Image: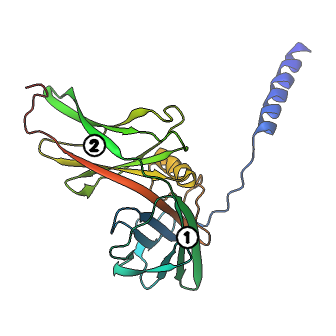
Amino acid sequence: MIQWIRPIIVLSFFLLFVSCEKIIQLDLNQNESVLVVDAMVSNIPNHTEVRLSESKPLFSAEPYAKISHAKVRIIQADGTSVILDEQAPGIYKRDHFKGIENSEYQLQIDWDGQVISANSNMPKMVPIDSLELVFSDRNYRGKEELDYALKVHFTDDIEVQNFYRFDVFRNDTLLEGFSVSNDLYYNGLETYHFIRGYALKPLDKVSVLLSCIDEANYSYFLVLSESNSPFNIAPGNPISNIQGQAIGYFGAFAQDKKEIIIPAYSDPNP
């Protein structure tokens, strides 16, 4: 009798555990293409840019197609519209335009009978106080080398909840990958953000772009940073502020940028 009771108890616990799990129904069309929006308003002149492309089916190896001849505009808080020009295939800009801190912006896109929109609030800018180069020794196949990392020093604004994104440029070329942070543990403090994992070498000009972003974009980028995909159309797609049949994001970013030159010498303490 006891031999039958034990399997029943185990089965009961299994059914109880399963009943506590949330079943998620995924409606995936592997052959469907979708509009991809990569859009930003910046407080830095000439940095405002909207990139439009069309994704390929889920398992296609083909690159995303650039979307041309769309009507793209930015609506400012006072209701005025700024039309962005297509300056390259799929890239829309407006010369000399820049956003204003503590202002709300709306993106509107008309393409192929679709209307896509999104809203974002530009926070107050938090400037970079300094960039610090950090050296560490590493041994790769018996060869001693230096590994370079960065500390981005800044002072968090105590009056508001802050969300940050950090991008790295090497010799004016944007490197793949980014990181995000929030001020949960350093609100109002002088602090730093540690960046490593990039292949940097002596005499490289390295720049860091600090973007103050709103909470919606922080949540979106946090998921992307964990999935290592710029536009993840697989299950687990992050929640976006884009309204309409599209994926991607629209952000109004208050940005600051600083650069540092990696010294030519190999000894960090000459």
Which disc, if any, is residue 77?
Answer: 1
Q: List the single residue furthest toward the top.
A: 2
Residue 13 percent location from the top left of the image: 81, 27
Q: What secondary structure is marked by label 2?
A: loop
At label 1, the amino acid type is: Ala
Residue 192 found in image quarter: top left
How many other residues sit within 10 Å of disc 2, few (<14), some (14-19) or many (≥20)?
Answer: some
Q: What secondary structure is marked by label 1?
A: loop
Q: In screen coordinates, is 202 left or right of 57? A: left
Instruction: Name the foreground residue: 252 vs 76.
Output: 76
Residue 171 percent location from the top left of the image: 19, 54
In contact (CB < 8 Å): disc 1 and disc 2? no
Q: List the single residue furthest toward the right.
A: 1
State the quadrant of the C terminus. top left
How many other residues sit within 10 Å of disc 1, few (<14), some (14-19) or many (≥20)?
Answer: few
Residue 93 found in image quarter: bottom left
Instruction: Name the foreground residue: 243 vs 251.
Output: 251
Instruction: Name the foreground residue: 60 vs 191.
Output: 191
State the quadrant of the N terminus. top right
At label 2, the amino acid type is: Tyr
Instruction: Name the foreground residue: 14 vs 169.
Output: 169
Mark 1 and mark 2: Cα distance apart in space: 39 Å
Which disc, if any, is residue 9?
Answer: none
Residue 220 percent location from the top left of the image: 54, 53
According to the image, label 2 marks what residue? 198
Which label's residue is closer to the chain start, 1 or 2?
Answer: 1
